[in-house]
Image: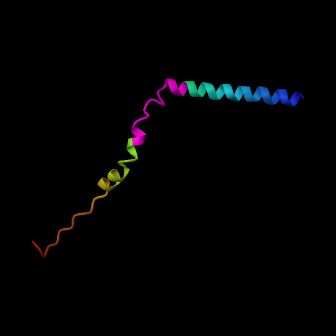
Amino acid sequence: MSVIYLLISISIVVAIFFFIAFVLAVKKGQYDDDYTPSVRMLFDDELIHSKVEKPKVENPTTL
């Protein structure tokens, strides 16, 4: 029976730790921006294509 008391007390301590971590994350603004991630996935392909540019090769025979 003492093992159950030990497990319950450890689980309460762990739950309090995660609750404090959650409250600190909310206070620091971790969850403030909920619009940008949903829009960012729509423009990911455009960002990748704009970064990749074909190298310009000058052909001396056409000059």
Give the vertical position of 36 relative to 28 (above or below): below
In this image, 39 relative to 56: left or right? right
Determine the image quadrant of residue 51. bottom left
On the rendered image, what quadrant is the N terminus found in? Answer: top right
Q: For this view, does 39 lie left or right of residue 62?
A: right
Q: Is residue 51 magenta?
A: no
Residue sitting nearer the eye, 52 or 38:
38
Task: List x then y, in percent, for residue 55.
Answer: 25, 63
Assign the C terminus to one quadrant of the image.
bottom left
Q: Quadrant of residue 57?
A: bottom left
Query: Relative to the observer, which residue lies in front, 27 or 56?
Result: 27
Q: Position of residue 30 (x, y in %)?
A: 48, 31
Q: Nearer the viewer, residue 2 or 39?
A: 39
- Residue 7 left/right relative to 26: right
Residue 8 placement, left or right of 1:
left
Name the spot of residue 34 as percent of width and height, x first.
44, 34
Q: Residue at x 71, y 26 (%)?
A: 13
Residue 17 place in picture, x, y as percent: 65, 27
Please give the range of residues in magenta: 24-38
